[in-house]
Structure formats: structure tokens, C-alpha cells
Image: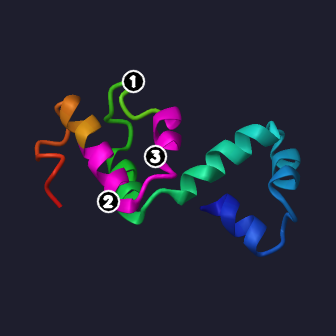
Amino acid sequence: MKWQDAIATNKYKSQSGLARALGLDPGRVRRIMSLLKLSPEVKDIVAGLGEYLPVGFLAETKLRELVNLSSKDQLREVKAILQEASIFPISPNQP
């Protein structure tokens, strides 16, 4: 969220400007920033997992695939992924 705040407060005029300041590829910054489109519930789940998740189960690329889904569908997909990894013990269809 710090990156989003830096752009919103005009510290940097664009994602490209932010990327230059951080020494990162603009595409990388854009891909990371796209994750801000995830629903608040999904962001909370991901943040709560910390480093617990097995490699590859909920990778950045998988999360980016979810950003264009509805909040409900994002949550269902994340729960299904975590259930498959035996991390989220409830049914993916539960609210």
C-alpha cells in the first residue's frame, strides 16, 4: 500500500516514476500494483498467511489471475487453493 500512497500523494507522478525511484522494472511495479485490485477479504487472507504458504500455492501470478473476478469469486478461488494446500480447512463454498 505504500507504493499506492506514494502515487496518490503525488510523491511520484506515475508507476513508471515510482519504478525508476526504486530501481525496478516498470512492468514489475505495474504487476505488483495490480494486486491492489484484490478484494479486501482476499488481501486480509494473504496478509495473514505471511510466509506460511508452501511455495507456488498462492503465487503472485495466481493472485493476478483473480483480480478481474468478482470479490465473491476471488474469495472462493483463494479458499479452494488454500484448502488444496491443507491450509484453509473450510469449504470453498462457505461465505
* Label tally: 3
Sequence order check, earlier mark of 2 and 1:
1
Name the residue: 36% across, 58% down.
44
Q: CA distance from mark 2 to mark 1?
A: 25 Å
* Residue picked out by circle 2: 72
- On screen, residue 40 versus residue 79, left or right, reads right
Residue reaching furthest to the top: 55
The kind of residue tagged 3 is Leu
**Residues marked 3 and 2 touching at CB (< 8 Å):** no
- Label 1: few (<14), some (14–19) or many (≥20) C-alpha neighbours in 10 Å: few
Sequence order check, earlier mark of 3 and 2:
3
Dividing the image into 4 quarters, which one contains the C terminus?
bottom left
Q: Which mark is residue 55?
A: 1
The kind of residue tagged 2 is Lys
Relative to 1, say whether 89 is above or below: above
**Residues marked 2 and 1 touching at CB (< 8 Å):** no
Report the span colored magenta.
60-79
Relative to 95, say whether 86 is above or below: above
The kind of residue tagged 1 is Val
Q: Position of residue 18 (x, y in %)?
A: 82, 53
Q: Secondary structure at mark 2?
A: helix
* Residue picked out by circle 3: 66
| Residue 32 counted in the magenta span | no
Q: CA distance from mark 1 to mark 3?
A: 18 Å
Q: Which is the main secondary structure of the residues drawn in magenta?
A: helix
Sequence order check, earlier mark of 1 and 3:
1
Q: Position of residue 21 (x, y in %)?
A: 86, 49
Q: Secondary structure at mark 3?
A: helix
Instruction: Please state which of residues 71 and 59 is positioned toward the viewer in this rendering.
Output: 71
Name the residue: 51% across, 36% down.
60
- On screen, residue 85 versus residue 45, left or right, reads left
| Residue 68 counted in the magenta span | yes
